[in-house]
Image (cartoon, rainbow, N blue to C red):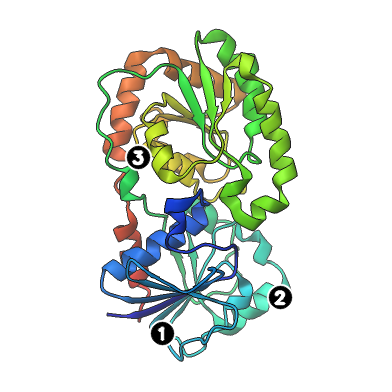
Amino acid sequence: MARIVLADDGIEFDGRTPDERPLGGAESSVVALTETLASRGHEVLVLNKCRAALDHKGVRWRPIAGATWPDAADLYIANRGDKLIGMMPEARRTAFWIHNPARYLMKWRYLSKLWRVRPVVVFIGRYHAATYPDWAPDGGRAVIPYGLPDSFCRATPLKDAPPPRAVFTSNPLRSLDWLLQIWARDIQPRVPGAELHVFAGAATYGSVGERKKDAIAAILARANSMQDKGVRVRGAVPKAVLIEELRLARAMLYRGDLEETFCLAVGEAQAMGVPAVVENFGSVGERVIDGVTGFVAPDDAAFAADARRILIDDELWRRQHVAALEKQRGWRWPDAAAAFERLIP
């Protein structure tokens, strides 16, 4: 058994949050990783902006403000925040788990800490790792993709093809405005009965979402104005509700974004057997097996054409639905936890 400490100074959440309200991918991954490590017999402490102390599913959650830090740990994971990197100098190994493109680290205030501490820098995909230059400091580099939650990996093949209902479940600031244009011009008019259900909102992103709520509201207002085009704004929903909605979906439509380093939204949809149409922006191409579990479209015209095909062609949908169920749920949180365990000296 190892002693593992994870620190995060982002938004407020704890181990119960995923069951209570929508939560972003990075925060959901902290919950999933720490709970999985605890289930594997490790002593796990999370210091973050949780509202109050909580012991939940084997993980001790403690408010980071005014916290008494342990003297040592076998593995210390500094999650995202550069101010956290040097907080446990006596840890046997420090890992710096980042979730956004690493370009933001190319400033002295970040590089100085990385040069001094030399943590293992943990990336969540190939595209993500490529955003950190070879010359930049580290104590090793590891690519550990997010695991898929078991709750998204229990679907069985559907007997009948769903109606032409597409879904968008990502950050509305990441190409939803573009999708609305493509949908209204090139997809919905050519697919009888087509609907686009938007599961998105500022609530998913906590205080970060609060700062961007006006921009998010503007995009969602545009979506709300397009009901005559089959657009339905459903809001941000908890994971349990999202799972049920994905079972009703015919396709996941998401262009991608250069800031996208994993895209759990597409990963979850694929694990549920929902074919996805994306473009090759950021990491989203890593989540789809082109031509097998969906399409990685080379341009906007191909994106629209591929979306129409999945929404109309039952046989194509079924092949990709079954392939996604068979091929897109192999890497789960126990696999990711085992990869983190290999960082322990």
Q: Quadrant of the N terminus?
A: bottom left
Q: Is residue 328 left or right of residue 54?
A: left
Looking at the rendered structure, the kind of residue marked 3 is Ala
Task: Give residue 185's quadrant in the image.
Answer: top right
Q: Nearer the viewer, mark 1 or mark 2?
A: 1
From where the camera sits, is residue 296 visible?
Answer: no
Q: Nearer the viewer, residue 256 or 159?
A: 159
Q: Quadrant of residue 145?
A: bottom left
State which tag comes first along the sequence, 3 or 2.
Answer: 2
Query: What whole-number distance in Å separates the C-alpha atoms at marks 1 and 2?
Result: 25 Å
Question: What secondary structure is marked by label 3?
Answer: helix
Packing grade of label 1 (10 A; few <14, some 14-19, many >=20) is: many
Q: Circle 3 is placed at which residue position?
A: 271
Residue in the image at 63% along x and 76% along y: 83
Checking the image for residue 216, the label placed there is none
Tell me the CA gap for discs 1 and 3: 35 Å
Left or right: residue 59 versus residue 224 is left
Give the residue number, with chain letter if any, for mark 2: 109
Q: Amino acid at mark 1?
A: Ala
Residue 294, image x, y percentages:
42, 29
Label 2 element class: helix
- Secondary structure, mark 1, is loop
Residue sitting at 70 percent across and 27 percent down?
Answer: 222
Q: 256 above or below 92? A: above
Give the residue at x 66% y 33%: 220
Q: Amino acid at mark 2?
A: Arg
Mark sitting earlier along the chain (1/2): 1
